[in-house]
Amino acid sequence: MATFAYQGKKYTGELSKGTIQASSVLEASNLLKKKRIKPLSVIEQEETFANKEISLFSQVNQKLLVGYLQQFSTLINAGITVLDASKMLEEQQRDKNFKKILFEVTQDLEGGSTLSDSFKKHPNAFPLLLTNVIAVAEVSGSLETNLKKMADYYEKASANRSSIITAMIYPIMMLIASIGVGIFLMVSIVPMFVTVFEGFDAELPGITKVTMKISMFLQTKGIPVVIVIIGVCVGVFFAKRNMAFRLKYDLFMLKLPGFGELIQKSNFSVFLTTLSSLLTSSVPMVKALDMSKEVVKNTYIKQMVQECEAEVSQGGRISQVFSSNFAVPLLATQMVKVGENTGSLEDMLEKLSLIFEREVDESSKRIKTIIEPLVIVLICGIVGFIVAAIMLPMFAMYGAIQG
């Protein structure tokens, strides 16, 4: 979507100007005509930092979207027209940004646009997956059912993402805390005893010598080390934009003990949930696979979905690709094969997605349960190491004085 500045004349003769989102000048002109504005000039605007900022802050929270879709489904099921339902939901919306978007959707509907076309103009509020499903539903006459399905889908996806974030962030924060405690002790506490130990005319224990060297290194070269670490992190972040590097990185992540299985099953949970929802919404298999790959975050698994798409388009089966790829859980291969043979693939995909959702939740809890005591032991080990390095020479000094 691009931004176009326009000048036009309303049918009342009043002049109008502003901006409009569209994919081309022709589409922008057609949208203006639907709004009863005769376009006099339509000029595409260059993308600026300000535009990006506006796009960033106009992102709609997924919880708002879920509530909106559920209410929309209920209203249509009650026999209310799409236009009237849109007006009602716009009036009761409290979020200013989302309310503005819903107002524009209602205007487009009044101008004769379909609901899917209205949604497509607001990608920050309505994901491409949703607009495609709505477009199919409008043709098949199953709008109410598909709205409910998509609400359930985004609700599940949000819960799944939250569990993954919790599982990944908790151990990372604990590890950072343990490293922080160690650095604080090395930089602030150990130097206080260094002058005392240097004046101690005796051989220092090996643990004390090591601790003093680490402390001196952190005091003299700590900042350059931090800069290097930050540089490496930034470098990896930008390198991930390179497809070849990203593929190797994501493959490495899949092979990590513990976390690899969590990443694998979380990606498959989202992929299978999406594919199942699309197939039950009457979307053809090849198109459903093409749309489903967009929700997969891991590049290696996304590439596997592309292979499935190519295989199916040539008359093959998904299970053929699944069986030859290590990244696919064995259960997924077996159940998909059974589903293809019995003609119950949609049901099998839905059951698989539920199984993987539960396993992701259990894996995240298990990782937290294992990591927490390990990090506590690590913190105790760091503190104990430093305390021992300080206290052993003190005991030696006390023994020498007593002797």
Image (spheres, grey):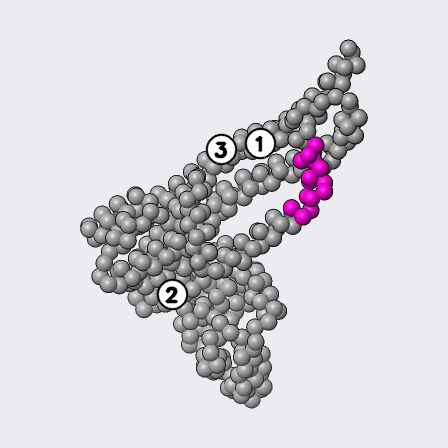
The residue at 58%/86% (across/down) is: 14
For label 3, the residue is 370
Mark 1: which secondary structure?
helix
The residue at 58%/51% (across/down) is: 232
Q: Marks 3 and 1: CB-CB under 8 Å?
A: no
* Mark identifier at residue 378: 1
Residue 266 picture location, percent across and down = 41, 47
Q: Earlier in the sequence, mark 1 or mark 2?
A: 2
Residue type beneath disc 2 = Asn
Residue 122 picture location, percent across and down = 49, 68
Residue type beneath disc 3 = Ile
Task: Tell me how far mark 3 sits from mark 2, CA to CA.
Answer: 42 Å
Residue 87 picture location, percent across and down = 48, 67
Task: Tell me how far mark 3 sits from mark 1, CA to CA.
Answer: 13 Å
Residue placed most toward the observer, 201 or 18: 201
Residue type beneath disc 1 = Leu
Furthest-left residue in view? 341
